[in-house]
Image: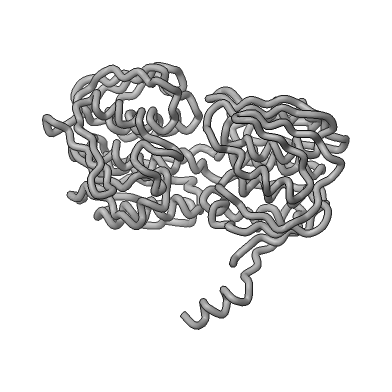
Amino acid sequence: MTKYVIHGGKPLYGAVEISGAKNAAVAILPAALLVNGVCRIENIPQISDVTLILNILQELGADVKTINRTTVEIDCSHIRNARVPDALARKIRASYYLIGALLGRFGSAEVPPPGGCDFGGRGRPIDQHIKGFTAMGADVDVNGGIIHAVARSGHLMGTTVYMDIVSVGATMNLMLAGTLAEGTTIIENAAKEPHIVDLANFLNSMGASIMGAGTDVIKIRGVSRLSGGSYSIIPDQIEAGTYMAAVTATGGELLIKNVIPKHLECIAAKIAEMGAEVEEMDDAVLVRRTGKLTRTNVKTLPYPGFPTDMQPQVAACLCLAEGTSVLTEGVWDNRYRYVDEFRRMGAQIQVDGKVAIIEGVPYLTGASVEAPDLRAGAALVIAGLAAHGTTEVSQIRFIERGYEDIVRKLSGIGADIRVVVTPDEAKSAQVG
């Protein structure tokens, strides 16, 4: 077993550089399928989800050239295959973006369900995606564990799609599908997250005609082709927010560089309510916490509300805040799977449906915990950094899906954290 071992109780000081946005990269890379030419994409985060998508593109026949650790050139001009490799796609939730991109380019797509979830089942159902593809003239079904989508007339047709719920994934997928569709596609009740704007900017820089990204109505005028070009991905709002939460929980002073402060205002507001100081700069934020944390209430909402992907991290802070806080999850079901792990560390949390009541405690105590998912894993790391004693976090593969060099970055700002491989795993690796 590979795990993080954290000796907590140390405040964080210094500066940390934020990587490119995971949630933008996992849509922009599939969008290269729509481009007839070479895409140079910069500021790509070095995370496992990105590696998987690049591997999928190569399996489909794309020419992927690594320029440096954050830049790739992708040429999908010669791809003729619209079937996504099963083993790779089932490892990543964002594989559903391949449906919209392949449908848009070829008029057909064969893609395994995202992250191994059953079609339209629990986890992150894609019913809003399917609704949109169907409205654009595609037949979509599942056969043999594969999602099959075929445009009835050979290509998608522009139409108006009203999202029953605000869905980031469906909004981005329909943007991909509509870029090369015939006519105009209008997405109403669209999501507004920064990575949606980033995807639109990428596509427009390649020759698309997308207007309204960042508002609740997006209009996509279909074009006949996209040409190559260069684009740099925005900084990661959630990675930045995670480091903001980390210094809030541990105390100290941290300069978080390479960010867009506007994207962080919803996070900064709640951290300030808890007693931290947040100072905005041109492309950085300074977070300082010296006194005690105080209770606050948080409800996750679509952007520009408090991000659901920051809910577990802010919970780690609230566990140490004086008084009783109420945390309400307004986006996803089943996002409190980390609560039992927090309780192992001495947290006092009661969950009723989508509401968690958190009674602050003077301190957390180190324990052996297991990351149930990406953001909860990051929250357990934050709890370990603030806790008395030693915390061991296992299942770190979830964390590495979305955080580049997290051990190196935390070590550079004063954290005592390291990666440990147990002897049994090391021995089996040598035998293999």
- Using the image, determine if residue 38 lies above or below residue 100: below
Which residue occupies 68% across, 41% down?
256
Tell me: residue 381, above or below residue 175.
below
Percent x, y of residue 394? 62, 59
| Left or right position of 19 against 364 | left
Question: Looking at the image, what colour scheme do you see?
Answer: one colour
* Residue 140, quarter of picture: top left
- Can residue 389 be seen in this snapshot? yes
- Pick the front one: 58 or 91: 91
Residue at x 43%, y 17% (from the top left corner): 216
Residue 35: in sight, yes or no? no
Q: Residue furthest front?
A: 352
Residue at 62 percent across and 70 percent down: it is: 421
Left-right relation of 328 to 102: right
- Which of the pair 63/370 is nearer the observer? 370
The image position of residue 398, as x and y in percent, is: 54, 52
Q: Number of labelled discs? A: 0
